[in-house]
Amino acid sequence: MADIIVVNDKSELYNVINQKKTEGYLETELAVISKSKLHLDDLHNSQISMIATSGSFSDRMSRLLTGEDGEEAVLSRYNLTEEQLEEHKQDILDNKLLLVANRDNSSHDEVEDHNAAYKEIDITHYAAESKGPKS
């Protein structure tokens, strides 16, 4: 389950990010959720996901037509209880930032097991075995 930390400002966000890194989290396992797009160049140049619940113009228009809630759409991927979902939605609407730390426990061994690029194939070919014309 994801570890979600609510922070009030950008300086506090940097402290929490550094704390999570010392706990062993990779940048790819961290995400920052905010109401609007954050302009933090050092985070945009990292592998930390920056997610704005307001989304793009097309996202806002589709939500207007479907009645979907942007905060709920973003938070739904973290398997939260109804209480946690409502609490964190309100945090986002109050212009707080959420740092989500979610461990990647998946194994990437299937790539090596099933990718032909990793298999050694004997490509020795003898003319006697060929069904084509012989010279």
Image (cartoon, rainbow, N blue to C red):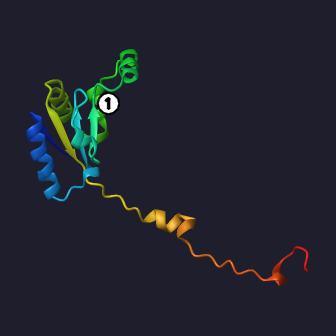
Image position, residue 22 (x, y; %): 13, 58
Q: Position of residue 25 (x, y in %)?
A: 21, 55
**Residue 75 visible:** no
Q: Residue at x 9, y 39 (%)?
A: 11
Quadrant housing the C terminus: bottom right
- Is 44 on the left or on the right of 66, as rendered? left
> SS for tag 1?
helix
Report if residue 57 is visible in the image: yes
**Where, by quadrant of the figure, is residue 8 drawn?**
top left
Is 79 situated left or right of 119 in this image? left
Residue at which label 1 appears: 73
Q: Is residue 39 left or right of residue 58?
A: left
Which residue is at a point 22% across and 27% down the rendered structure image?
35
Q: Name which quarter of the figure residue 84 lies in.
A: top left
The residue at 35%/25% (across/down) is 56
- Picture residue at 57% right of the left edge, 66% below the top: 116
